[in-house]
Image (spheres, helix red, strand yellow):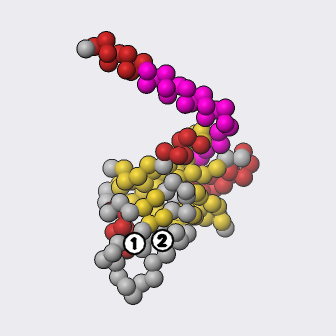
Amino acid sequence: MSITVNKKAFHDYFVEEKYEAGISLEGWEVKAIRAGRMNIKESYVIIKGGELFLIGMHISPLATASTHVSHDPTRTRKLLLHAKEISKLIGKVERAGYALVPLDLHFVRGRIKLEIGLAKGKKQHDKRADELDKDSKREAQRAMKERQR
């Protein structure tokens, strides 16, 4: 079950491979995510010391959250992947000029997972071409719908 999708990532990047990673979260963050109080639109993934970290994901604390814990809505969160997957990603990001982009936040058997994509940036003309394709498909769907009536 998807919690949130980063539509901007699909607009700005060609996503070539997808990986599912766990996230190291605190208790108040899990509660806030379950309540839908997060944003992954401006977030990105970096590699630091052979580990992956999610930067820029904003989680707003609930009003009922504990007052004795200091809440940092945009703290850096560690991503949990197998060592082989991490080494493969490091190789592709450093050599081939790829970027790691968060795509989707979802539940898997009660746990919160982040789908990250190995992606290459789109140029402006690629974005325009994609927009034209979407428009033409939308027009074709409208025409088909009108014919069926």
Mark 1 crowdedness (10 Å alpha carbons): few <14, some 14-19, many ≥20: many
Residue most toward the left? Answer: 149
State the extent of the magenta-drawn residues as a range: 118-139
Dots 1, 2 in contact, CB < 8 A: yes
Q: Horizontally, is 138 left or right of 77 in the view?
A: left
Q: Earlier in the sequence, mark 1 or mark 2?
A: 1
Residue most toward the top? Answer: 147
Which residue is the site of mark 2? 73
Where is residue 90 shown, x and y percent of the image? 66, 55
Q: Main secondary structure of the magenta part?
A: helix
Q: Residue at x 35, y 72 (%)?
A: 62
Q: Residue flagged by tag 1: what amino acid is it?
A: Pro
Q: Residue at x 45, y 78 (%)?
A: 71
Which residue is the site of mark 1? 61
SS under mark 2: loop
**50 to 137, vertically: above or below:** below
Residue 111 numbered tag: none
Q: Quadrant of residue 112?
A: bottom left
Q: Quadrant of residue 109?
A: bottom left
- 4 part of magenta stretch: no
Q: Quadrant of residue 122?
A: top right
